[in-house]
Amino acid sequence: MPLSRRLTTGLGIAAVATLATIIGAPLSVVAAPAPAHATAARDAASWLAGEFTDGSLPGPFAPEDWGLTVDGLVALSATGVDAPTRKAATAQVAKHVRSYNSYDDWGIEGFTDGGATAKLLYAASAAGADPTDFGGYDLRAETLSLIAGADAGRQRGRITSRTTADSGPDAGNTFDQSFAVLGLARSGDLPQDTVDFLIRQQCAAGGFRLYPDTADGPSPSCDEQPGATLDVDSTAMAVQALLAAAEDGAGGAGDAARKGADWLVTQQHADGSFGGSGPTTGANSNSTGLAGQALAAAGRGDDAARAATALAALQLTAGNGGAASADAGAIAYNTDGLTAAKANGITETDRDQWRRATAQALLGLAQVPLGRIGLDPPPASPKPTPTGTASPTASPTTTGSPTPSATVTSPSQPPSPTTAAPTTTALPTTTAVPTTAAPPSTTPAAPGLGGLPTTGAAITSYVLVALLLVGGGVTLLVLGRRRAT
C-alpha cells in the first residue's frame, strides 16, 4: 500500500478512535447486517431460557438432561439472550461434567464418552469459560487423550470413548467428530489427524455419513462404504467444523467445507426447509436449523435466508399461537406439531420435543456459525416495521412429516433412558447453582429485548466531529508535504 494511503487510513482510524472515546463505548467501523430473522431468534431464545430451572433443562424422564442443557446453553450464547440463565447453566454444566460424559452416576466406573467430552469442550469455549479448568476438568487434555493415535490405522484421528470393559464397536459418529474439531480449534492447536478423519466421512457427492462404522466394523471412508447414507444434519455439523478448521490453517478443510455446502443446497426443499435421514427424513426444524446455520457460515446467504423463513413459519407468536400463545417464541419440530399446539397448547408430553427443536432451530435464525459463537457479537434485532413486526414471517410449510414421537433428538443428543441402562444424559442429582465458572456477561440490553445488545443512540453530531477530524488531518498532511518540497 502507498505511503499516502497508509497515512489516510491511519488518520481515519484515529478519528474513529477519537469518536469512540467521545461516546465512551467501543465502535465498529463497519457493522455487519443483522439477519432478517434476528428477532425470531431472540424470541426463540427467550422462550428457551424460560424453560431452564436452576441452570438446567429437564429431560422426559429426569429432572436434568445435560446434553439438552448444553444445546440450550449454546443456543442462548448464539443470541446473547438472558445472561443470568447462561451464567447459571454454565456453572451447572461445569459441576456435572462426569454426569454427562461418564456412567459414574449409574455406579459404573471406567467409562468416558468421547463425543460428550468433545461437546463439553466446545460448549465451554463457546460460553466463555476456561475449557482447561471446567468444573476442575481439563477438557482439552481429556479430549486429546481420546483421539485415536497412529496405531489405529485408518481410524487415526477419531474421537473415541474410553472404557475398562469390552463394549464392542465405538458408538462415536460424525457429530462427535465435528465437536472434537470445533472444540480443539477453539481451545488451542488443532491436530490435522482429527480433521483428516472428519474429511474421510465425506462421500464424493459432497454429503457426510452419520456413522463411520457398518455392521461389519469400521469403514475406512464414506466412499468405501457401499450405499452409504448421506445425512443433512451430519453434513451441516461437518461443514461448520471444517470452516473452523480452515480458519485454523488445517489442510483440505476449506475445500471439503465448500463441497459439503454445495451438497446441502441440493437437499433444500422448495420452501427452504430440510429433512434429515432415517426417521427424520421429513422436513423438520432441527435439520433446517443446522443446515441454515451451515449455509450462512459458508457464505450461502440467500439459501440460509430461505431456511430461516421456513423456520419462522414454524414459530409460535402471540398472534398465531392459538391455545399455545403463552409459549410464543417456541419453534415446532414440524407443521403437524405446530398445528397440534395451536389447537391444544404444548402438552407436558410434547414439551421436551419443543425444547429440542427450538434449541437447534434458533441457530438457523441467528446464523452465527458454531465456530464463531462466543467470539462474534450476537446479531442485533432489526428495527420494528410500522406494523410492529420486526421480522418477516411465512405461511406454514407443507412438507412436514408426521411427528415421529414425543421426543425428537439429534444424533448429538440421545434420548434420556426409560430403563436403568446407562446413558450420558439422564442424571439423578439436583444441585444448587454455584456462582463460579460463569461466562463474561454481554452489554446490558434495553428492557424487554431479551438480553440482546441494542443500539439506537443519536450519533450524528459525533459523526460530524469525526469528519472534521479526518478533514483536518488531510489538510495537515497536504501542508506538511508542501513544506517538505
Image (cartoon, rainbow, N blue to C red):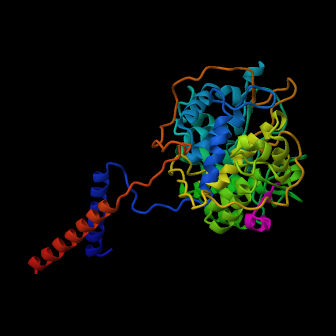
**In this picture, residue 19 sits left or right of residue 124:** left
Q: Residue at x 78, y 37 (%)?
A: 352
Q: Nearer the viewer, residue 339 or 403?
A: 339
Q: Nearer the viewer, residue 244 or 9?
A: 9
Compared with residue 54, is residue 323 higher up or lower down, i.e. above or below?
below
Give x and y (percent) for residue 128: 52, 39
The quadrant the N terminus occupies is bottom left
Residue furthest to the bottom in view is 485
Give x and y (percent) for residue 295: 66, 62
Compared with residue 256, is residue 149 higher up or lower down, i.e. above or below?
above
Q: Is residue 265 inside the magenta stretch?
A: yes
**In this picture, residue 87 sits left or right of residue 234:** left
Give the quadrant of residue 6.
Answer: bottom left
Whether residue 109 is visible: no
Span colored in magenta: 263-276
Whether residue 485 is visible: yes
**In this picture, residue 43 sits left or right of residue 30:** right
Q: Residue at x 79, y 43 (%)?
A: 323
